[in-house]
Image (tube, rainbow, N blue to C red):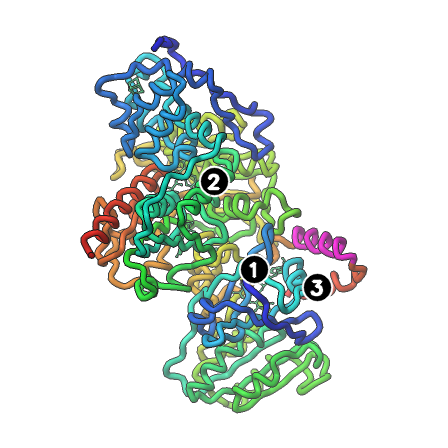
């Protein structure tokens, strides 16, 4: 296999910043076959590959890259799918720069191998020709319930269906997919891809029931009464946090969850063709520094805002957002106000936001997270002239289902306590994804769903 | 899909649906609500569960046509289906130790008031009710309320039926006459609940109101329904919708309800155009309703 010694990643074809900042179409367009083979040839096929250790689900990276280099794309996707059920999603949204690509040896002398881009290429190649439904074993006639339909749940449900279980997914919203549909915007993860993943697990025989707010319409006890022998909880970390500063209830202040749900799930960008409105003003401030903040800011721009600021209390280095999205956001003209923290939101007499008072911060001693703690600089208050504020400072566990479920031990922050296989304190109940770890990543949720499926299978095997 | 089993026109622009929703009916309790969506692309709107029958698997909702979605809903007939009908949501209300309760319902608020009073009546609690509407024609649920009340007062703003005046006038009278209650439940437009709660405050009688902020999911994940109660942020969909009326910041609620005023107008106008409706007057009427 010829080696490509370029120090740079093969560039990703993408929409130009000045065009994409006003549309919701996908930003990155994906590698062509030539691009992919070219990039695959940068991989050194290490004997002890660091990349694999960096991958939370140990995708056999050199193996799949080798197959791409050999133009055996079928073989490549097969390798990936041994451990990753959602490669079209993960190839687009994984923080590769902190995972596989961070450990790639090629990265020591330039750009690492574009592992995420190659993963995406292999997945898209398979999608384009139609994903084959594997041959399914005979039905076992045993029922498993899966609550929620984010990546953890979709994976758990799919894996159990492949083993012959009758799986039912119960989703609160009218559309399955979790954060992949209501949170991550179309321009980063086309909803058609999520839809395909859902269709795929349906083809595996999984029944997907929407409009099911579990804990309200049915409880975990009800599920056992209905003959489900095991329950997986993958309800995510969907409870929005507010800052607790004055003025947060003014009109034009949104939690990122509401802002993104209105836009992505309810399609407010097509209002008035669709019925759900949103108010995005001329000058928008998004508070926070993670993926959620980036997505909110870039969505605000696409909704027509003139000026969008990201207000983050730490510095660029501490920002938890994916590197690529930070770069994209900068290219699109998002303004970053680092070391800045809101103190209060100012409203007009009708209750609409007209400004946000902030204070400058400086970095002090490292805190519990190991990052240097931001401390306010006395007397540095100033007022930003904004008419919309989006709060993206994190989420917590939604207690709705938990409160209605007996016998579930919780962590001190209110997440469900589970062992490494997702087993909870209650017999027959597993949990995984953000509802166990707190807000994390798609790949970790996917991995948790996989482990839980295996553990549920073992349990049900031994039960009879 | 959820089927409309029965439709009734209760008053001009106020309609009742009996929905086929067995799972919701099985768990429904007084004080809870549903969120529905007519079709793909539609808005999710909350409606209170006005009645339910677990055995028949039915849930009754009553709605007033104020904007695009409720008007579109009103065009549906028995036998039609809607896309989504989610619930029961919100915290059920309970009054385990009450002996005597006063219910005050204004306009459409009578519908959400009814299941609570029905439960109290079935518990053997003495129920006094005051219901009112703009005109006799707009009055709803009179027979139902009669059936669950030991004493019922009817008022209309124009005097076309019962007492001439607002329900709050009767409320004030009863309290001034020294009548006492373990709890007063007031449901109606925010302004009515605000004024009502001010009337009961000096008497120190616990006063429950049911809030109607704009909602999206109804499960506590967006925070759009947040209201200030006793200086704290509460999410009406999961912490309510019933709250202590003496602690609610009604002015903030009323302001927040106006967030999408411009967009609501656009939606409604488009709806009317597509339905070839010439009654621009009606649009104006609906708007002033929504303002309250
Ligand atoms: C805006 C945004 C951007 C992100 N960007 C990235 C990224 O670029 N890369 C990355 O790796 N990660 C990203 N994340 C994080 C990632 O999306 C999550 O870690 C992941 O989706 C968690 O998966 P999950 O299956 O645990 O739950 P979720 O995806 O949160 O899904 C939970 C599902 O459960 C449903 N549910 C909740 N309660 C109930 C109930 N009582 N009954 C029934 N159903 C219920 C919810 O409606 C939801 O559909 C992002 C998150 C957000 C919000
Ligand atoms: C818990 C709860 C219970 C309710 N119960 C009833 C009921 O039993 N019967 C009834 O007729 N109405 C009820 N409402 C109000 C009802 O949801 C609104 O009238 C309806 O959403 C209006 O939609 P529209 O498109 O027809 O009107 P729009 O033109 O969109 O709005 C008219 C007014 O309704 C309010 N509103 C708009 N969208 C929403 C939304 N998504 N959620 C809540 N309010 C909104 C706003 O104040 C707005 O000014 C309830 C509201 C809540 C929160
Ligand atoms: S570490 Fe980099 S070069 Fe080595 S196998 Fe992995 S991707 Fe290839
Ligand atoms: S409606 Fe979204 S949190 Fe209440």
Q: Say which residue label 2 marks.
A: A196
Cβ–Cβ under 8 Å for marks 3 and 1: no
Residue toward you, B155 or A189: A189
Q: Tell me the residue at 64%/63% (across/down).
A: B73
Mark nearest the camera among 3 and 1 is: 1
**Ligand 1 lies in which image quarter?**
top left
**Quadrant of image for the N terminus of chain B:** bottom right
Vertical position of residue A450 compared to residue A460: above or below: above
Residue A123 magenta: no
- Give coordinates of residue B3: x percent, y percent: 57, 65
Specify start and end residues of the magenta stretch as a single range: B262-276
Marks 3 and 1, the one that precedes in the sequence: 1
Q: Say which residue label 3 marks.
A: B286
Cβ–Cβ under 8 Å for marks 2 and 3: no
Magenta span main SS: helix
State yes or no: Cβ of the residue under disc 3 lies below 8 Å from any atom of ligand 2. Answer: yes
State yes or no: Cβ of the residue under disc 1 lies below 8 Å from any atom of ligand 2. Answer: yes
Residue B264 magenta: yes
Residue A27 shown left or right of residue B134 in the figure: left
Mark nearest the camera among 1 and 2 is: 2
- Give coordinates of residue B150: x percent, y percent: 52, 91
Q: Tell me the residue at 38%/45% (across/down).
A: A154
Q: Say which residue label 1 marks.
A: B45
What kind of element bears circle 1? Answer: strand
In the rendered image, the residue lying farthest to the right is: B278
Residue toward you, A449 or A108: A449
Residue toward you, B56 or A313: B56
């Amino acid at each position: 296999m010829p080696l490509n010694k370029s120090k740079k990643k093969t560039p990703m074809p993408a929409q130009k910043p000045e065009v994409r900042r006003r549309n919701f179409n996908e930003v990155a367009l994906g590698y062509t076959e030539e691009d992919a083979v070219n990039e695959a040839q940068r991989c050194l096929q290490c004997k002890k590959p660091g990349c694999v250790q960096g991958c939370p689900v140990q995708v056999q990276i050199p193996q799949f890259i080798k197959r791409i280099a050999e133009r055996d794309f079928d073989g490549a996707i097969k390798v990936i799918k041994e451990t990753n059920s959602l490669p079209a999603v993960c190839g687009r949204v994984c923080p590769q720069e902190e995972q596989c690509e961070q450990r790639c040896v090629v990265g020591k002398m330039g750009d690492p191998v574009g592992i995420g881009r190659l993963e995406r290429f292999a997945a898209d190649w398979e999608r384009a020709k139609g994903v084959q439904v594997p041959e399914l074993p005979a039905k076992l006639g045993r029922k498993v319930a899966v609550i929620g339909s984010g990546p953890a749940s979709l994976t758990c449900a799919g894996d159990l269906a492949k083993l012959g279980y009758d799986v039912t997914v119960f989703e609160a919203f009218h559309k399955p997919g979790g954060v992949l549909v209501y949170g991550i915007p179309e321009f980063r993860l086309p909803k058609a891809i999520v839809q395909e993943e859902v269709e795929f697990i349906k083809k595996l025989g999984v029944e997907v029931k929407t409009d099911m707010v579990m804990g309200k319409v049915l409880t975990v006890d009800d599920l056992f009464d209905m003959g489900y022998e095991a329950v997986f909880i993958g309800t995510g970390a969907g409870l929005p946090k507010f800052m607790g500063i004055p003025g947060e209830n003014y009109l034009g202040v949104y939690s990122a969850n509401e802002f993104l749900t209105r836009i992505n799930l309810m399609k407010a960008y097509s209002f008035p063709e669709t019925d759900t409105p949103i108010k995005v003003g001329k000058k928008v401030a998004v508070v926070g520094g993670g993926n959620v903040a980036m997505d909110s800011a870039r969505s605000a721009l696409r909704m027509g805002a003139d000026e969008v600021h990201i207000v983050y209390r730490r510095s660029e280095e501490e920002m938890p957002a994916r590197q690529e999205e930070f770069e994209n956001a900068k290219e699109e003209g998002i303004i970053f106000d680092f070391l800045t923290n809101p103190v209060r939101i100012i409203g007009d007499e009708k209750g609409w936001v007209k400004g946000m008072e902030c204070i400058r911060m400086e970095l002090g001693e490292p805190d519990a997270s190991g990052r240097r703690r931001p401390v306010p600089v006395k007397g540095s208050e100033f007022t930003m002239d904004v008419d919309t504020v989006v709060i993206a400072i994190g989420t917590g566990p939604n207690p709705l289902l938990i409160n209605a479920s007996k016998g579930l031990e919780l962590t001190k922050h209110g997440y469900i306590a589970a062992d490494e296989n997702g087993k909870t304190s209650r017999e027959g109940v597993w949990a995984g994804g953000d509802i166990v770890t707190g807000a994390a990543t798609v790949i970790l949720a996917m991995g948790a769903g996989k482990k839980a499926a295996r553990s549920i299978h073992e349990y049900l095997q031994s039960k009879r | 899909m959820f089927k409309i089993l029965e439709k009734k026109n209760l008053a001009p622009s106020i309609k009742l649906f009996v929905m086929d929703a067995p799972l919701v009916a099985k768990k429904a309790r007084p004080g809870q609500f549903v969120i529905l969506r007519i079709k793909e692309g539609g808005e999710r709107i909350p409606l209170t569960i006005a009645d339910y029958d677990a055995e028949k698997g039915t849930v009754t909702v009553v709605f007033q046509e104020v904007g695009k979605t409720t008007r579109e809903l009103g065009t549906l007939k028995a036998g039609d289906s809607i896309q989504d009908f989610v619930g029961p949501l919100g915290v059920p209300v309970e009054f385990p130790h009450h002996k005597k309760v006063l219910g005050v319902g204004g306009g459409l608020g009578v519908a959400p008031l009814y299941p609570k009073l029905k439960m109290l009546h079935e518990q053997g609690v003495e129920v006094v009710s005051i219901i009112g509407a703009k005109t006799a024609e707009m009055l709803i649920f009179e027979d139902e309320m009669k059936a669950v009340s030991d004493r019922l007062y009817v008022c209309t703003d124009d005097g076309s039926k019962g007492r001439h005046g607002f329900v709050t006038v009767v409320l004030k009278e009863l309290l001034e006459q020294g009548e006492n209650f373990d709890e007063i439940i007031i449901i109606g437009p925010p302004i009515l609940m605000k004024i009502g709660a001010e009337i009961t405050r000096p008497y120190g009688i616990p006063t429950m109101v049911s809030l109607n902020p704009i909602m999206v999911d109804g499960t506590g994940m967006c925070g759009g329904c947040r209201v200030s109660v006793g200086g704290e942020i509460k999410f009406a969909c999961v912490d309510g919708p019933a709250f202590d009326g003496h602690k609610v910041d009604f002015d903030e609620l009323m302001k927040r309800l106006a967030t999408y005023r411009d967009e609501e107008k656009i939606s409604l106008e488009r709806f009317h155009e597509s339905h070839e409706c010439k009654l621009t007057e009606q649009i104006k009427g609906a708007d002033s309703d929504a303002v309250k």
